[in-house]
Image: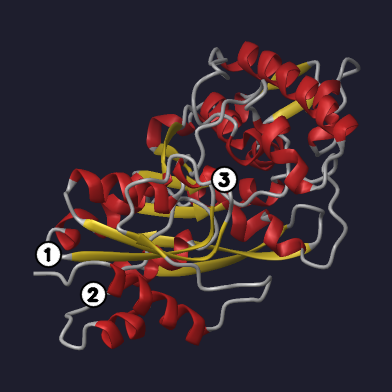
Amino acid sequence: MAEGVRHAIPEAVIEMIPIADGGDGTIEALYAGAGGKVEEMPVRGALNEPATAVWLSLPDLAVIELASACGIAKLTGRTLKPLEAHTYGLGQVIKSVVDLHRYKRIVVAVGGSASTDGGAGALTACGVKFLDSAGNEVGLGGGNLGKISSVDVSAIKDWVRDVRIEVATDVHNPLTGPNGAARVFAPQKGAIESDIQLLERNLLHFARVLGAATGRADHESEGNGAAGGTAFGLASALDAKIVSGFAFVREVLNLESKLEKADLIVTGEGKLDGQTISGKAIGELLKLSKAMRRSLIAVPAVVAKDTQGLNGFKAIVAAAHDDKLASFDDIARATTEAVRQCKQPG
């Protein structure tokens, strides 16, 4: 994109700023923009495969990324199992970071999940016990949530006294209902209609039993459905606050001060569609640019037919056509064309 801008405006002064919204790439964006130290640890992946998770250490702040531990992108080449996939690996990272007693604030970016387990897997790794009617521990995965009869949260009761935990999400969906985790996102994780119905029932049951144990049972608020309900599980059991992933990244990167200097903002995206404005980075950047009265152009790989609510861009030019992947040259050419469609800055 920078090359495309230079081609259109050779004298342009360009500052490249990585952004993210709580999904895949959040740690990479923050590390590139704010520094810190990237740490690694072995975990159980979403389908019990060995995986390596990364997290970012900043002064008084640790950033954990679900996608790195048990995200759907890590399952490339594997058969998706929507009822068995879990978030246990995420919990392993959370527990490890909490046990360091080094951070006042831990932010968990939960985009890009492979599961719909309400965060039960993560909480299990943290020490929470989910028991059936016979007192036996219930297995991992969203398909088992309906078997939970009681929840023992005694192992984590002191956590919230020492650290503030936040859940950074890139969606606004509630836990259940027509816009909930199962209905909207489970199909992307391999669920068929019967799976969706089971997961919906299980999430509602899970919310009741976990809420009874923690006293925090609000599953209807925005963002609770993020990452297959992981946001709800962490909010209920760890008293975590659900925040906008983009707003968090914006804060750490001090984004406003950088955009104030700009005459024109250029952003990329994989697919520009109706979901873009629902908490995604580019939709939030559009709102921010409008508030700051800055022109924003988008260079997505593709533009879907469903672009409702995306008015406000100065220009939109897709980099890919005819089902072909966009190359670096395609992106540069599309950026040049988008910039030329705008009035020259200044």
Q: Nearer the viewer, residue 163 or 199?
A: 199
Q: Is residue 15 visible?
A: yes
Give the crowd class for mark 1: few <14, some 14-19, many >=20 residues within 10 Å.
few
Q: Are marks 1 and 2 in contact (CB under 8 Å)?
A: yes
* Real-space CA distance between mark 2 and mark 3, rounded to the nearest whole angstrom: 31 Å
Q: Give the amino acid at mark 2.
A: Glu
Work out whether residue 60 can be spotted.
no
The vertical placement of 336 against 97, above or below, is below
Please rate how many residues cluster around mark 2, counting C-alpha atoms within 10 Å: few if below 14, some from 14 to 19, many from 20. few
Q: Nearer the viewer, residue 326 or 187?
A: 326
**Mark 3 lies on residue:** 306
Frontmost of labels 2 and 3 is 3
Asked whether the beta carbons under mark 1 and mark 3 sit within 8 Å of each other, the answer is no
Note whether 272 is above or below 227 in the view shown. below
Amino acid type at circle 3 is: Asp
For the point 60% across and 60% down, which residue is it? 68
Residue 98 in the image, given as x and y percentages of width and height: 49, 46
Q: Residue at x 57, y 28 (%)?
A: 232
- For mark 1, give the secondary structure: loop
Instruction: Pinpoint residue 95: horizontal percent, then vertical percent.
Output: 57, 46
The numbered mark at residue 15 is: 2
Q: Which residue is mark 1?
A: 261
